Amino acid sequence: PSTAHAALATERQRVLTKPPGSLGQLEQIAITLAGLTGTDQPTVDPIHIVVFAGDHGVCAEGVSAFPQEVTAQMIANFASGGAAISVMAEELGASLEVVNLGTVGEIPELPGVLNQIIAPSTANLAETPAMTSSQVVAALTSGDQTAERAARAKCRLFIGGDMGIGNTTSAAALACALLDQAPHTLVGPGTGLNTEGVARKTRVVERALARHGNDQDVLSVLTSLGGFEIAALTGAILGCAARKIPVLVDGFIVSVAALTAVHRQPGVRDWLIFAHRSAEPGHHAVLKALDASPLLDLGMRLGEGSGAAIALPLLRSACALHNRMASFSDAGVSGKSED
Amino acid sequence: PSTAHAALATERQRVLTKPPGSLGQLEQIAITLAGLTGTDQPTVDPIHIVVFAGDHGVCAEGVSAFPQEVTAQMIANFASGGAAISVMAEELGASLEVVNLGTVGEIPELPGVLNQIIAPSTANLAETPAMTSSQVVAALTSGDQTAERAARAKCRLFIGGDMGIGNTTSAAALACALLDQAPHTLVGPGTGLNTEGVARKTRVVERALARHGNDQDVLSVLTSLGGFEIAALTGAILGCAARKIPVLVDGFIVSVAALTAVHRQPGVRDWLIFAHRSAEPGHHAVLKALDASPLLDLGMRLGEGSGAAIALPLLRSACALHNRMASFSDAGVSGKSED
């Protein structure tokens, strides 16, 4: 990040025709983007959205309100334009790429879907490590490659999304291990478990953490408790930061991937802008650990990167106001009186 | 509002390919807009934005951080495209109309500015009623006419904005009278008063309320404590509701106008969607009185309708998702398992 450009942007916000500070968080967004992209005319376009999909062996424990076949079915729905993120990508004029890392259900070749199958699903993390070390490397690499494609297309903002029935169980387990928190504080209803289901899911995460033990090495934790799509998101976020592409972070799953990336490389934090606070209760602790104040709090909990896509126009507005508003002197408007 | 269309939209939200409820407040926005406009394909376009401007006699009491000449200067800035609301109107592809109801500073004829001068400013509401009864009728009528023009242009959403140095003093006084609250609970820094300034402003509102007395009649309160632009906003909101045009309500000033309109005609409330929670502390009580849960809370406090303009893409996204997402059956996606 360029502190010089951030300082110039801070100064510019002070002289635009508005009471200083009156654009609230939008001022900081413009300043952050100016600093990250080293420009005095910040922009977020073009935008690249990638949804990573993969199945979870832990579904055998009955941790989701939806059947596992939905992961594969939703990949087809992404391709045909019927999913929330598909509609939003079109609405925003953003490119959308779907990376299939492996599903239990079969899927044909589909336009816009890149098949980088690691396995039909991860292993059941309650009983054994979710991934082998070669699997986690494959997933991290797949994510890094999407960052490389975004960089080649000169994208100025990256949005990652997730699809994987069972993935809030994996994400909660990961966050518990990384933050050293008890499962009941981070496990929630996901796509819609009832109270009994949440209790069952909590016991599953407790078993997973007991099995995993005290190994705090980030790569070990990710291998043991993660999922293909969560590891790929981690790789994508690391890859974007390395290539100086700001990331607009979605909800619970992507925030846990971001937490994993930041634990691996603290400098990554600078490149993250947080889109929204999910209704999934565990998101709160993850945001707090990342010192994040998200833009939106609409009670969303859909995944797919949808919360980031919904927040995106706020970034565009912040840039438009920063770049195009007149200054007090240009417009001949009197400034604030002395206190 | 059409309860039949709202019920159909509620049912549609249940069958779209997402966990039920997972779009949070965006689901209710789509349902509300479907009901208000009596359609199964809700939309907010075209959008009409009107900024009402007028000066306040109470500025003589030293209640603002900015000099009074700024009201007229900002009208010129709206016309030349340098103000926040000008940039946002262009960004959103919305029509922008500026209605000048009277300023102390002189302004030439300007493109996009409708001059409907009532007087150079209201009277000092700390000492006498702010308006005469013919002045308040003129302002209400001016507002109603903007709703009529929006209806003729077949606009599906109305955004009202305010410009008037000193108008948070007037709005706080109005809200105190309508809600029977003490000035210190509703008076805030506005464009940037320091602690001493806020204390002075509070005493001014106390004097105004003591002068006004106990008359709770809405029109009397508005005449006594309002401003030209606040009365015009009240007229515009009443006029939009009468013509079945939904209103996206901006921050503190517009919310006080909305409160005034709802006190005059409770059915108006149905037509209001609340954009954001302003940093101005009095907004909280006004929102609570209107039972409003705004979409955004970004610490904005700029006025001009800017908070509503910033929130507008959320409504467009809510409509796009509602209208274009696939259903579980269309996409061949399995629904939620039985609990």
Image (tube, coloured by chain):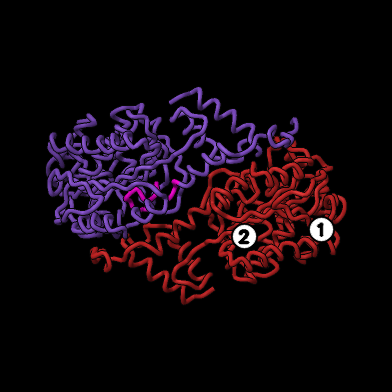
Chain colours: A red, B purple
Subunit that carries the residue with mark 2:
A
Question: Which numbered disc flags the more N-terminal residue, 1 or 2?
Answer: 1
Image quarter of residue A144: bottom right
Instruction: Name the amino acid, label 1.
Output: Ser
Position of residue B103 in the picture relative to residue A217 (left or right): left
Disc marking residue B6: none
The magenta segment is B301-312
Residue A154 versus residue B212 in the image, above or below = below
As shown in the figure, which amino acid type bears the numbered disc 2? Ala
Query: Which circle marks residue A224 in the picture?
Result: 1
Residue B303 placement (x, y as % from top left): 33, 51
Measured from the top left, where is residue A252 in percent x and y? 65, 51
Q: Residue at x 83, y 42 (%)?
A: A61
User: Disc 1 is attached to a residue of which chain?
Assistant: A
Badge 2 is on which residue?
A289
Q: Mark 2, residues whose alpha carbon is within 10 Å: few (<14), some, or many (≥20)? A: few
**Image location of residue B254, percent across then percent down:** 32, 43
Q: Is residue B42 left or right of residue A101?
A: left
Task: Pick whichever, B250 or B287, lies toward us.
Answer: B250
Position of residue A337 relative to residue B234, above or below, is: below
Residue A279 visible within the image: no
In the image, A77 versus B306, the foreground residue is A77
Q: Quadrant of the C terminus of chain A?
A: bottom left
Q: Residues at badges 1 and 2 in contact (C-beta under 8 Å)?
A: no
Please tell me whether residue B125 belongs to the stretch shown in magenta. no
Q: Judge whether residue B303 is colored magenta.
A: yes
* Position of residue A91 measured from the top left corner of the image (x, y, whole percent): 54, 48
Determine whether the residue tagged by mark 1 lies in a helix, strand or loop. Answer: helix
**Which is more foreground, mark 1 or mark 2?**
1
Residue at image position (82%, 59%) is A213
